[in-house]
Image: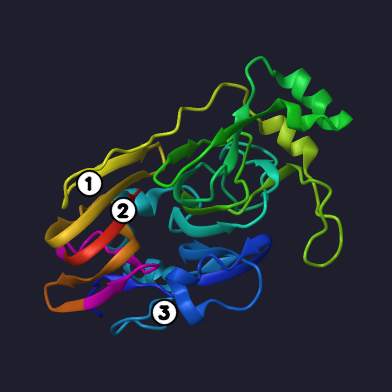
Amino acid sequence: MTPLYPLLLKPIFKERIWGGRSLEPFFGTGLPDGRIGECWVLGEHEQGTSEVTNGPLAGKNLRELRLEFGAALLGTRGLSAPGGRCPLLIKLLDAQDDLSVQVHPEDSYGGLPPGELGKTEMWYILHAEPGARIVYGLNDGVDALAFAEAVRSGGIEACLRYVEVQAGDAFYVPAGTIHALGAGTVVAEVQQSSDTVYRVYDYNRLGLDGKPRELHVEHALKVARYDTPAAALRPEAVAANQWQRLVQSPFFTVDRGRCDGYWAQATTPESCDALLVLSGEGRIEWQGGAAPLKAGDAVMVPAGLGAYSVEGAVELMRSRV
């Protein structure tokens, strides 16, 4: 059996009606034509599974490797997570227009498609145009009855809680939270491995096929929650070669850090390290190998690897199960 090592992954691009070209600084000429709204940088899902680009396992995808290596790849938590697949899905998002107002269910929701999970997620704002904002929950005093009436009467926008954002903000978006990214934002997103979206409002837009986009109002009203979401985390600068916690949830932890020179790391048997390079250039090294790193790269560091290091000048986001 081929020994495991840090796996660089091929991005999966998805055109969206609200997308644009703001991911070009990450991918350059590798960004396909069109309105690219999502880049799935790490994940295993029927809508897209990451493929390895480096080393002897190049060309294999995460599903194949999970079946071959099990906990040595994902860790004991990763392998035992609901759904039977890699439980993390990590994306870069380019919102050149407002996304639909939407909500995601919990794992326990009975209306989920067969084999699908609920969806809790977090956002880390990489870029925000002046005045850019998101929908993050509902205004105080909006309960289930008031929201349902607003949805049916076309008055939903008066119920929405808008939050102005800036680069460096982090938001935790648990399942059930009414939310939407706003125009002029570029975001790194970590979420459960799910593609279940219940749109409740979409500005009467047409999709890329020229037809009205489907809404899922009944599902949305059943799974929405009406408490106030946690305030945005606006992290202060931290010293080089230190991790700063952005989000801790039942499904994942997400940390941010900046490597300057040499930074020793190690995985644990419980989880792989899912690294996303946010800026800069450097390299990742392990016993017996090394690979270059640049902005936009995603690396799955197997749980069973243990010690490794990052070198150079790179800003990283690290996610663990």
Q: Nearer the viewer, residue 253 or 156?
A: 156
Tell me how far mark 3 sits from mark 2, CA to CA.
23 Å
Q: Secondary structure at mark 1?
A: strand
Quarter of the image for residue 46 reads bottom right
Image: magenta residue range: 291-309
Vertical position of residue 315 compared to residue 285: above or below: above
Residue position for label 1: 243
The mark found on residue 308 in the picture is none
Q: Position of residue 70 (x, y in %)?
A: 34, 63
The mark found on residue 318 in the picture is 2
Question: How busy is the neighbourhood of tag 2: few (under 14 within 10 Å), some, or many (20 plus)?
Answer: many
Vertical position of residue 247 compared to residue 227: above or below: below
Residue position for label 3: 60
Q: Residue at x 84, y 48 (%)?
A: 204
Give the position of the N terminus as an image quadrant.
bottom left
Q: Nearer the viewer, residue 173 or 132?
A: 132
Q: Position of residue 186 (x, y in %)?
A: 51, 55
Relative side of 116 to 1, left or right: right
Q: Residue at x 39, y 34 (%)?
A: 233
- Say if mark 2 contacts mark 1, CB within 8 Å: yes
